[in-house]
Amino acid sequence: MVLFKRNPFGHILFIKKWLIRIFGGITHKRYRGFNHLQIEGSEIIKTLPETNVLFISNHQTYFADVVAMFHVFNASLSGRDNSIKNVGYLWNPKLNIYYVAAKETMHAGLLPKILAYAGAITVERTWRSKGKDVTEKRDINPNDTENIRIALEDGWVITFPQGTTKSFKPVRKGTAHIIKQHRPIVVPIVIDGFRRSFDKKGLLLKKKGIQQSFVIKKPLEIDYDNDTIDQIVEKVEFAIEQHPSFLKVVPAEEIEN
């Protein structure tokens, strides 16, 4: 039956649609009400193909960043220009949007598990476990990279290539390998104001009246055949404004967080 149509990961699309509608409705005022989300570049979203698009972004909270992206993407596809006015855009949301998240984060409680159903591709971080860096890096789980491939073939994937909410941490080479291997259109996003608005998990509102920014940039120019992994990493760092050269223009409190 159409009602029980599933995506490649076995999730029932009818359930996913209602999760996005419900949680989108609950969270809308966090970006247009208690705080204000200033958006730039939404016209780029409308020009993207249906599949094989990889969004790369800096990261400030576990969940609020991704939720904002679901709002902005769906609002843009519904004809809003740099606005999430009128939450009705969530009535018929794009259902093939996925996001890469740490497995331990998405398994930490009932709410994260519910949010994972909305599109999480859970991966095991090789460099970190239980909130701490590990001295001996674990091998990459081949199932993780395979799931990202499947998601790209089915739709759009959001990833945070630093793998942490801390500013100016190195971009992980795994993202560059994904770009080189699967050749997606790579769209950079730069966000700000989220760590001032929310707690680290992005679930609790910490402060009202914060100006949040959400800048969508033009797709990266990448030579998939000739660019090295290190060159792609550097392009990603500059695109999401996390290259060390940006340190001089960022307030110290932002770096410490």
Image (cartoon, rainbow, N blue to C red):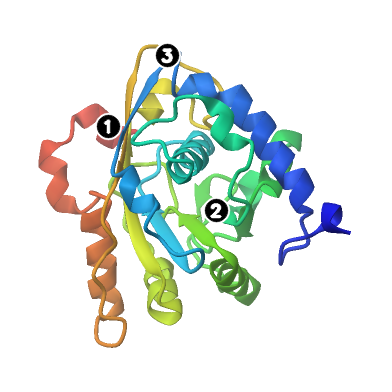
Q: Amino acid at mark 2?
A: Tyr
Q: Which residue is mark 2?
A: 99
User: Looking at the image, is 213 positioned above or below residue 158?
Assistant: above
In this rendering, which labeled residue sits more in front, label 3 or label 1? 3
Q: Residue at x 76, y 36 (%)?
A: 110
The residue lying furthest to the right in this view is: 1
Q: Earlier in the sequence, mark 2 or mark 3?
A: 2
Q: Amino acid at mark 1?
A: Glu
- Which secondary structure lies at badge 1? helix
State the residue in front, 219 or 42: 42
Q: Amino acid at mark 3?
A: Lys
Measured as percent of width and height from the top left, residue 249 is found at: 12, 37
User: Looking at the image, is 12 positioned above or below residue 15?
Assistant: below
State the residue in front, 172 or 95: 95
The quadrant in which the C terminus is found is top left
User: Looking at the image, is 87 positioned above or below residue 180?
Assistant: above
Apparent side of residue 153 relative to residue 31 in the rendered image (left or right): right
The quadrant in which the N terminus is found is bottom right
Q: Earlier in the sequence, mark 3 or mark 1?
A: 3
Q: Residues within 10 Å of mark 1 (few under 14, many from 20)?
A: some
Report, in whole angstroms, how far the alpha carbon at label 1 lies from the one at label 2.
Answer: 24 Å
Q: Which residue is mark 1?
A: 254
Quarter holding residue 4: bottom right
State the residue in front, 136 or 44: 44
Q: Earlier in the sequence, mark 1 or mark 2?
A: 2
Residue 207's mark? 3
